Amino acid sequence: MSASAGPSGGAGPSGGAGPSGGAGPSGVRARVLVRPKEGILDPQGQAVERALPALGFTGVSGVRVGRLIELEIADPAVLPEICERLLANPLIEDYEIEPANPVAPTQPA
């Protein structure tokens, strides 16, 4: 008998409420922008930059490709630690945290 044998056990890509099994969203919405640090090779950005002239777009340089992560979090104070430990690789990536609107509490049906 394994404690994590079922689909709801452990931290899997379920897209559910999270490891605490908490109720609906509360707290604040935040956006985290993760991108390669300055001086780190960005092959995706280079590919986009090379493709733009072929599509008729000139005068574009310094293209950097990153990712945007949106989430709802009850305690925004832990967000930097989440970024450092999971969302970004601090050796090669920088991140920016952008707070968004507070999340309205959900009412039970």
Image: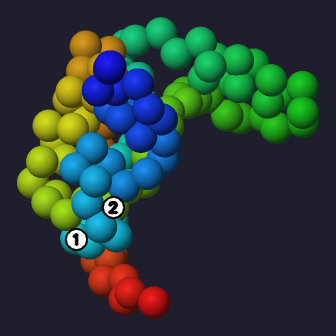
- Residue 21 relative to residue 12: left or right: left
* Whole-percent x, y for residue 71 in the image: 37, 55
Q: Secondary structure at mark 2?
A: strand
Q: Nearer the viewer, residue 26 or 99?
A: 26
- Relative to 78, residue 13 above or below: above
Amino acid type, residue under disc 1 in the picture: Gly
Whether residue 9 is situated above or below residue 23 in the rendered picture: above
Tag 2: residue type? Glu
Q: In the picture provided, is 99 more to the left or to the right than 41? A: left
Image quarter hosting the N terminus: top left
- For disc 2, the marked residue is 72
**Along the horizontal axis of the image, is 58 left or right of 63?**
right
Which residue is drawn at the image coordinates 26% and 72% (left, top)? Answer: 26
Residue 67 in the image, given as x and y percentages of width and height: 50, 37
The residues tagged by marks 2 and 1 sit, at their Cα atoms, a distance apart of 7 Å
Q: Is residue 36 visible?
A: yes
Secondary element type, mark 1: loop
Q: Marks 2 and 1: CB-CB under 8 Å? A: yes
Residue at 30% over, 37% down: 95
Position above or below: 37 against 81: above
Identify the image quadrant of the C terminus: bottom left
Sequence-first disc among 2 and 1: 1
Q: Is residue 102 left or right of residue 58?
A: left
Q: Residue at x 32, y 32 (%)?
A: 10
Q: Which residue is mark 1?
A: 27
Q: Which is more toward the observer, 71 or 59?
A: 71
Which residue is nearer to you in this view: 61 or 85? 85
Q: Residue at x 41, y 25 (%)?
A: 5
State which quadrant residue 33 falls in: top left
Q: Is residue 87 above or below residue 26?
A: above
